[in-house]
Image: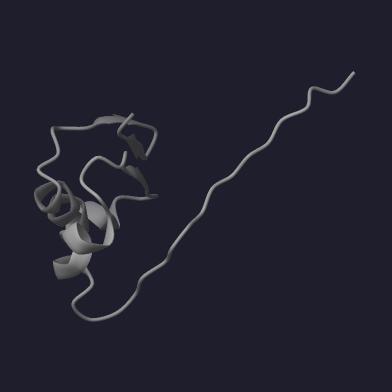
Amino acid sequence: MRNNFEFYAPTRFVFGSGTMERLADLVPRETPVLMVYGGGSIKRNGVYEAVRTAFSLPPRQTANGICHEL
């Protein structure tokens, strides 16, 4: 027997120059943040810290390359 469910996940992708500087304007502060990344380039290129700084986020729990804020 299948369980009924509904999943709604509006997603907005923003790319390009100046995007990191616009993060605080693009995402309301109270919105949970989920960062999913692979081999670690997000940390090497500074994106990880830039996102944390933009939202004044606490240190993350990281497991197997997936970083989450619940």
Q: Nearer the viewer, residue 61 or 40?
A: 61
The quadrant in which residue 1 appears is: top right
Question: Quick check: 6 above or below 21?
Answer: above
Q: Position of residue 17 (x, y in %)?
A: 22, 81
User: Considering only vertical position in the picture, is 40 above or below 61?
Assistant: below
Residue 32, given in percent of the width and then of the height, sits at 32, 38
The residue drawn where x is 54% and y is 48% is: 9
The spot of residue 57 in percent (x, y) is 14, 39
Residue 30 versus residue 21 in the image, above or below? above
Q: Residue furthest top?
A: 1
Comparing 50 with 30, the one in front is: 30
Q: Is residue 46 left or right of residue 26?
A: left
Residue found 24% across the figure and 40% down from its top? 30
Q: Quadrant of the C terminus?
A: top left
Point 68% across, 36% down: residue = 6
Q: Residue furthest right?
A: 1
Residue situated in front as seen by the camera: 66 or 50: 50
Disc tally is: 0
Q: Residue at x 12, y 53 (%)?
A: 54
Which one is in front, 27 or 70?
Answer: 27
Snapshot colouring: one colour
Query: x, y (%) of residue 50?
Result: 14, 56
Residue 8 figure quarter: top right
Residue 18 located left or right of residue 34:
left
